[in-house]
Image: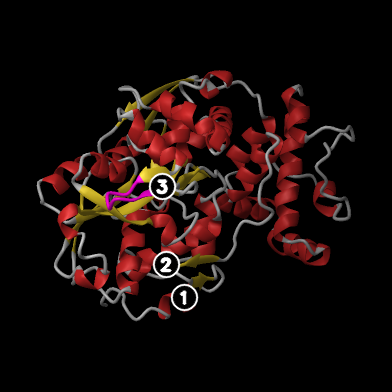
């Protein structure tokens, strides 16, 4: 729908959290009981809010509208912001377009919030019946999501960016409204390499990574390069499904791997590997996996998408509390979910674990669960795609990050659910002691002496 001229011109009206009707409740609460005309009014307020956020200075906003026209302006906004999903989230409890969903996932602890939402009842509370489809590899997750076999999926956080750009598959617009986990990975080496703790000794070694477009790949490459090794020439990197890595380590087909839990801990449990470095020691609170869907699914099922979002955010924040972790481990250990020994999952989720080197470590932040999709994290991922030659052309970093990582949506939903959300969409991150400023991605890229050729 289009905004009225009054709605566009009333630039002095404050953008408060109160509903436009003047009563002390949110727009979402109002729309839950509103008729069609009130829903339309809420959509207009949302569009007005976006326009004012983009052009906060009233004279500039009026000049822009006069220059391009109201409809053109709103069309441009709609091209960047997923208005359908924003509107559905404002409508909150709208009728679900689809109640039975298929969600693809890999049996790793990164998927804990998405998986635990089933036995803990978070999907059911939203009126959803979810079938969790355990999948062996990330390419299968991608392909089945794009084919519509999965309604939504547990994905590696760089995957929605890569798919949107058409890297590794046909381009399809994706949205990523929530991170599932931060940290939760490690570099594990075969026990025969206990004397090679210095990465400078790793020349010629073979490492498994779960997917090209993964934080594992980017973090391992970063770690190797910081120790003077070129990951494309000094070592061999092999893409391998996470469930296959321990067996290949045991068979000495690889010298090590970087992957999500529980496979690092399982290698220790089975006596074939030791934990060399937690990825939290490379970048503390780095993103790993995420909940994602195609833009087509969101546009066709906005209320269902909003309900799914709410369920996963609630589950993520539940799993983030250490006092819940033991029960969560029990809930997801069974054959329908992660199918792992409870001891292994408890060591990961509680952060007290044997490292395979004879020590018992206590790292409460070994894995954590934080749903907020920082757009600065997306920009960092894009710099690494370009650094290592996955992307040759120029990248519109900020635009792509805003299009895929729905930080504004996440903030609004978290706030409406009663949780505290960050006030900004981006921040500075520190990786191995080096600060990353998301406002200067090209300068950051040029600062590295080791990168892909050409």
Instruction: Judge whether residue 230 can be spotted in this image.
Output: no
Task: Report the quarter where the N terminus lies.
Answer: top right
Q: Cβ–Cβ below 8 Å for labels 2 and 1?
A: yes
Q: Secondary structure at mark 1?
A: helix
Distance in Å between CA atoms under marks 2 and 1:
8 Å
Q: Residue 19 location, x and y as percent? A: 82, 36
Residue 10 covered by magenta stretch: no
Which label number is shown at residue 184? 3
Instruction: Bin the neighbour count of mark 1 within 10 Å (Cα to Cα): few under 14, some 14-19, many 20 and up.
Output: some
Q: Which residue is mark 1?
A: 444
**Going by the image, does 353 lie left or right of 372?**
left
* Direction from residue 113 to residue 428 in the image, left or right: right
Give the image location of residue 121, x and y in percent.
52, 20
Which image quarter is the C terminus in?
bottom left
Of labels 2 and 1, earlier in sequence is 2
Which region shows up in magenta? Answer: 354-361
Residue at 32% across, 41% down = 142
How far apart in space, not on screen, are marks 3 and 2 (Cα)?
22 Å
Residue named by callout 2? 383
The CA distance from mark 1 to mark 3 is: 26 Å
The residue located at (68%, 39%) in the rendering is 419
Determine crowd level at label 2: few under 14, some 14-19, many 20+ residues with C-alpha closer than 10 A.
many
Nearest the eye: 39 or 105: 105
Residues tagged 3 and 2 counted as in contact (Cβ below 8 A)? no
Q: Is residue 361 visible?
A: yes
């Amino acid at each position: 729908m289009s905004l009225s001229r009054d709605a566009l011109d009333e630039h002095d009206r404050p953008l408060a959290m109160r509903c436009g009707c003047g009563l002390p409740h949110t727009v979402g609460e109002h729309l839950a009981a509103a008729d069609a005309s009130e829903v339309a009014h809420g959509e207009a307020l949302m569009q007005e809010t976006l326009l004012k956020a983009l052009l906060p200075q009233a004279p500039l906003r009026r000049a822009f509208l006069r220059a391009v026209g109201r409809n053109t302006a709103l069309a441009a906004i709609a091209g960047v912001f997923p208005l359908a999903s924003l509107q559905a989230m404002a409508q909150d409890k709208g009728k679900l377009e689809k109640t039975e969903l298929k969600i693809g996932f890999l049996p790793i602890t990164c998927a804990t919030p998405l998986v635990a939402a089933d036995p803990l009842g978070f999907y059911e509370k939203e009126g959803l019946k979810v079938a969790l489809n355990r999948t062996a590899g990330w390419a299968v997750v991608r392909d089945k999501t794009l084919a519509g076999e999965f309604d939504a999926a547990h994905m590696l956080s760089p995957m929605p960016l890569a798919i949107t750009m058409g890297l590794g598959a046909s381009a399809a617009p994706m949205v990523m409204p929530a991170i599932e986990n931060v940290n939760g990975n490690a570099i594990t080496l075969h026990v025969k390499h206990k004397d090679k703790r210095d990465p400078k000794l790793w020349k010629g070694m073979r490492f498994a990574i779960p997917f090209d477009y993964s934080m594992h790949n980017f973090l391992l490459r970063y770690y190797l390069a910081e120790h003077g090794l070129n990951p494309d020439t000094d070592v061999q990197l092999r893409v391998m499904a996470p469930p296959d890595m321990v067996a290949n380590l045991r068979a000495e087909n690889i010298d090590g791997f970087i992957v999500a839990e529980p496979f690092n801990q399982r290698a220790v449990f089975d006596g074939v590997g030791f934990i060399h470095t937690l990825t939290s020691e490379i970048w503390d609170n780095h993103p790993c996996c995420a909940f994602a869907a195609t833009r087509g699914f969101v546009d066709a099922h906005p209320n269902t998408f909003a309900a799914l979002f709410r369920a996963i955010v609630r589950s993520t924040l539940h799993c983030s509390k250490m006092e819940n972790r033991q029960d969560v481990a029990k809930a997801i250990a069974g054959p329908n979910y992660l199918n792992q020994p409870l001891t292994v999952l408890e060591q990961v989720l509680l952060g007290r674990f044997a490292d395979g080197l004879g020590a018992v470590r206590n790292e409460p932040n070994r894995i954590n669960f934080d749903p907020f999709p920082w757009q600065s994290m997306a920009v960092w991922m894009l710099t690494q795609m370009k650094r290592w030659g996955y992307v040759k052309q120029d990248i519109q970093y900020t635009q792509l990050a805003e299009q895929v990582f729905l930080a504004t949506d996440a903030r609004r939903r978290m706030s409406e659910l009663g949780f505290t959300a960050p006030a900004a969409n981006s921040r500075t991150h520190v990786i191995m002691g080096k600060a990353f400023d998301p406002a200067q991605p090209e300068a950051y890229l040029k600062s590295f002496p080791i990168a892909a050729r050409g």
